[in-house]
Image (cartoon, rainbow, N blue to C red):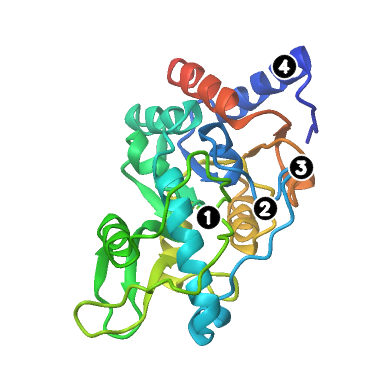
Amino acid sequence: MVLVTHEGSLATAQVGRAIDALAGRSLAILTGAGVSTDSGIPDYRGQGAPTRTPMTAQQFLTDAAARRRYWVGSHLGWKAFSSAQPNLGHTAIARLEASGLSTGVVTQNVDGLHVRAGSSRVVELHGTMRRVLCTRCGQVFDRRDIAERVEIDNPWVAVPENVPLGPDGDVLPASTDDFVIPDCTVCGGMLKPDVVFFGEFIPAEKFREAEQLVHRSEALVVAGSSLVVNSGIRLVERARRRRLPVIIVNRGSTRADAKATVKVDAGASEVLDAFASALPAAR
């Protein structure tokens, strides 16, 4: 394994080595927050990321005041979050699938940008902000419809321009006392975004989908993830057990650097674009 920095020619050389390791193989791709930073969505754990105290599942479900704070912040952030556009990295991954080189993408992100970029085989490990679920009856709602209801019920809510945005689309509101929390229009139950909160487990069937995608592949590319979340490490281990090449593309260290076939310390967008340009000709 070679650990490289993102300094010019050295990174170019290591991208070349990664392409050589991937040539002629079908790829599974695992992405984290670093793939979406070029779309204006900050990373949780990247260098310079602000310290955050994210909402836990227990807080959301049991504390009405905490739930109110979450919904105000989430709504204010949603407008900016939902307007983010796929970047070069997202479109490169979609190109790899369209060319028949990728079996699909497993993402730890909840922003939906892989789907909007044109990828059709997407496993969203941590869910998606596009949907809201009723915790009582299971009814599914489009987040856009919930956002419309929020603004009708809370006309005082102003959506400022250039909202400071976290990786989950959340911001810290100034006041939440008068906010009316949306509820289920079917049964009146509690609504929750269709995402895995801190303190929750990834649904077993969702992780099985990710495992199957890796199992159908001949190499694994990890892009924009520090692999702090155990689900990512587990997928890397699945690939290593099958002796598949593991390519890691990330600015800064990850938990699996020592296990990578090639580690490229560089931005995900430009490296993924290089893969999408070079690999079809290398079949």
Label 3 near label 4: C-beta < 8 Å? no
Tell which circle, 4 or 1, labels the residue nearer the N-terminal end: 4
Q: Is residue 63 above or below residue 266?
A: below
Secondary structure under tag 3 reads loop
Give the label, 4 or 1, closer to the camera: 1
Q: In the rendered image, which residue does mark 4 sit on? A: 13
**Left or right position of 57 against 134:** right
Q: Whole-Å distance between the Cαs marked 2 and 3? A: 17 Å
Q: Position of residue 27 (x, y in %)?
A: 48, 38
Q: Earlier in the sequence, mark 4 or mark 3?
A: 4
Identify the amino acid type marked 1.
Asp
What residue do we see at 45% from left, 36% from top? 26
Q: Position of residue 135 (x, y in %)?
A: 36, 81
10 Å crowding of disc 2: few (<14), some (14-19), many (20+)? many
Q: CA distance from mark 4 to mark 3?
A: 27 Å
Query: Which of the two marks, 2 or 3, is nearer to us in this view?
Result: 3
Residue type, numbered disc 2 = Leu
Residue at mark 1 to residue at mark 3: CA–CA distance: 17 Å
Q: Is residue 60 visible?
A: yes
Q: Are marks 2 and 3 in contact (CB under 8 Å)?
A: no
Query: For numbered disc 2, what is the local secondary structure?
Result: loop
Verify CB contact (< 8 Å) between mark 4 and mark 1.
no
Q: Which mark is residue 48?
A: 3
The relative height of residue 268 versus residue 109 in the rendered view (above or below) is above
Name the residue carrying label 2: 227
Q: Which residue is mark 1?
A: 168
